[in-house]
Structure formats: C-alpha cells, structure tokens
Amino acid sequence: MPTVQVVVGAQWGDEGKGKLVDMLSGDCDVVCRCQGGNNAGHTVVVDGRSFFFHLVPSGIIRDDVMCVIGNGVVLNLADFFKEVDELTAMGIKDIENRMRISERSHIVFDFYQEVDVLEEQTRGRRLLGTTKRGIGPAYASKVSRRGLRLVDLIGDWDLFCEKFKSLVEFYKHQFPELNVDIDKSLEELLVYRERVRPMVRDTVYLINKLAHGYNHKILIECAQSTMLDIDFGTFPYVTSSNCSVGGVCTGLGLAPSRVGDVYGVVKAYTTRVGSGAFPTELFGELAERLQSLGREFGVTTGRKRRVGWLDAVVVRYAHTINNFTALALTKLDILDNFDEIKIGKAYIDPETGATYPTLPSSPDTLEKVQVVYETFPGWKTDITKIREYKDLPSKVKMYIEAVERLCGVNVRWIGVGEGRSNIIIKSS
C-alpha cells in the first residue's frame, strides 16, 4: 500500500492547502515540495500566530519532520534563507538540519526578476499578471538548457562563474537595458554556496529510498493549483510548472505507482489573482464583501484577489486530471452571513445553447461562456465553533452535499475557521 499522500489545489490557488498539509503532516515524517518557486504562498495558523511559507515546505513547523525540496522546484537562494531566518525567529527549530534540497534544483538568479518585468512589458495589453519573482525566466532557462543548478553551484567554482557570465551575456543580448553587477552577484552566490551545501542531496535517491518498504509516511504539497498548471491550466494565464499530480513524479523522481491518496483542496467559493478567464467572477458590493470577509489578499504578492462563486466545472475538470481521493472544503465559514449562495454547475455556448462537456481549452471561449447556477439558501449562522458534521445546520449540509454531487468527489474535511482546530472531519 503506497504511503505517499499528495495535496493538490483544485482551483486557481489560495485554497488553503497549507492548513491541510499542516494537519496531515502530524502523521508524517517527510514533507516535500515538488515544483514552483517562491511565487507560491501557504499560510498556517497555530495558536493565533500566522506562519507564511513560500519555498520551505510548511511541514517544517512540526519538529520531527524532514522536509525535501525536489528537483522540480526553482530556488531563489536569497529568499530561501530570508524565509529560513524569519521562521527561525518565530521559533521553528533546527530548520537547516531538517532540510534536504535537490542538487538538480535550478537556481533563480536575482536578475531573472528584472527579466520577468521586461518580458511582461513586451506583452502590451495581454499582461499575464506574473508575480515578477523570476520564476518564468528560471523555467525558460531550464528548458532551453542554459540554466544553472545547485550541483553546479557547489561544484567547480571557476566553471560555475564562467557559466553564470555566459548566462548573463545571453540575457543582455536579448534585453540590452538589463543591468547586472556580475562581481557582486558572484560574491553573494559564494556565501550562499557554503550555507546551502550541507542541505544539498541527490533527493531522487533519497525520496525513493524513503518510499521503499513503506516504512515512512511521505506527504507532498503541490504549490499553486491545477488551473494554473502549464499544460492543463487556463493557458497562457498560468504558472511555469506542472502543479497537478503529474508534477509529483517529474518534480521528485517518484514513479506513479508510489503515489497513494491524492487530496484536492477547494475553497467554498473561488478566487483568482492576475489576468485570465474567471466564469463565476463577482463584481461590485458582493465581491467587495467576499474579499473583505475572506481577507482575500495574496500571501506572495499582497494583491487583492478576484472572487466569485464556487465553480463545479473547474473542480470536476481538476478531478479528471488528478483523480482525487477526497476533497477538503475550506473557508466555509466565510459564507456564514450570505442570504443566498450559488454554485456554477455548467457552461453553455451562448451562440448554440449547447452545454460544454468539460472546461474549454481556449481562453477566448472560456471568457464567453454562460454559467448555469444552482442557488442555495444561506444559513445565516456562525459555524466556527462547530466540530462535528452532525451539528452543522441543515442548510450547511445541503451546500456541502451539493458540492459533492456537482463536483463528483466526496468531501472529507471542512474548514470552518483559520486555526488548526477549526476543521470538521466528515468521513474517512
């Protein structure tokens, strides 16, 4: 029986994956990140204190957990160590001794952030809304085979310097206005080189050794979400990595047969940061109310999130890609005081009246779909103190059971507040 569990976002991110990872990690001894970079943002609230994670797997909050950053992650060393220092100052112990980072992980250099900005400026009106953290350029360098990895950094220093200078010259040829202080950059990288060295491992060997024999319980947290996946998301308004379950195999070197339960995380409504189609998006007073109640501001960018009703078409599509074992339905308490609540259950072609069988792949088509909604009465009750499913008001149960029916997956966990204890287990 595989002992590898995976947590995947089923929408456009910000669903509350960190909370589920925090809960599940209490029964695991290894927690991994498999893709993305510091464009990700997970929040875990413990005893009223908020911990923010961008590169460090959120399982590090548990003292007895080893954390692994896989080869699919792109690593900004300055931001990584800043995050480590901030988490250490908040009382998380022995972080660097419990971290294992893949020697195959590509480095996000500081000048990639400037390249990210310059590339976005060339898009004119069709801005992607990137986080401008240099993640896209890092993955582009990886695919074009120009990128540099941690194994290069901790290897022959003279050879690394030569390759770094060549990489900078390539980008300066593309963007003449790019300004890079090569000597200063190499000085900083030399410092990071010595600090990161003890953490660098062949994590493909390590993770498969840990998975073999099923003696270790391994939890993998996917960053971003299925609808931002480079292949399956709402392209081109996506991230630069595979943030659906397939990214687990390529981003850690695990065979598919090693993967056991895959849990999808779904917010009780929908949010999105940046550009791109959003069929169930709300505007005006209702949107502002949902943004305010849900405190919908990005952990990474601080940008206000766009908000809308839960979109079952999106979740069904994510289930098709990931084959979820069960769902975690988060932030249900945010809907406590609405008179009525809607779920988008189908898309209709406005020209033909035909129902789309699945999520359209064309962004232009997705922008034009008409959404068919199912409407539910609000429960107008504070549910944050409830801990048993049987104690929920009937109208809340009606909504949860509609989510299961319309999305085609059972709900196992229900989030009714931000704290560790604010969760209801519906079924096993």
Image: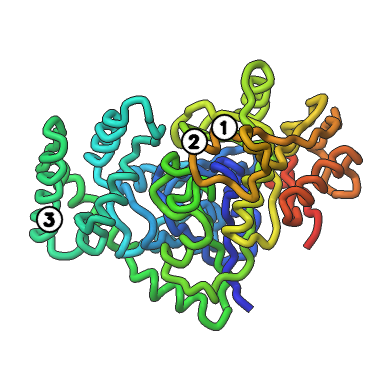
What amino acid is at disc 3?
Lys
User: Which numbered tag is attached to residue 149?
Assistant: none
Mark 3 nearby-residue class (10 Å; few <14, some 14–19, many ≥20): some
- Residue 91 appears in the figure: no
- Distance Cα–Cα, label 2 vs label 3: 41 Å
Q: How many numbered marks does the figure carry?
A: 3
Residue annotated with mark 2: 364
Element at label 2 = helix
Please tell me whether mark 3 sits on a helix, a strand or a loop: helix
User: Local crowd at mark 1 within 10 Å, few (<14), some, or many (≥20)?
Assistant: some
Label 1 or label 3, whichever lies nearer to me, is 1
- Give the mark, 2 or 3, whose residue is nearer the N terminus: 3
For the point 39% across and 36% down, the residue is 130
Query: Circle 3 sits on which residue?
Result: 163
Image side of residue 74 versus residue 8, left or right: left
CB of mark 1 within 8 Å of CB of mark 2? yes
Quick check: can you spot residue 376? yes
Residue at left offset 85%, top offset 49% = 388
Q: Which residue is drawn at 36% across and 42% down?
A: 82
Q: Which residue is disc 1 drawn over?
A: 368
Q: Mark 1 near mark 3, Cβ–Cβ under 8 Å?
A: no
Horizontally, is 278 left or right of 251 in the view?
Answer: right
Viewer-closest of 412 and 184? 412
Residue at the location (25% across, 32% down)? 118
Q: Quadrant of the N terminus?
A: bottom right
Q: Quadrant of the C terminus?
A: bottom right
Asked if residue 153 is positioned above or below residue 120 in the image, the reply reads below
Q: CA separation, marks 1 and 2?
A: 7 Å
Q: What residue type is labelled 1?
A: Lys
Seen as rendered, the residue at the extreme front is: 352
Q: Where is residue 34 in the image (x, y as percent from the top left)?
A: 45, 59
Which kind of residue does numbered mark 2 sit on? Asp
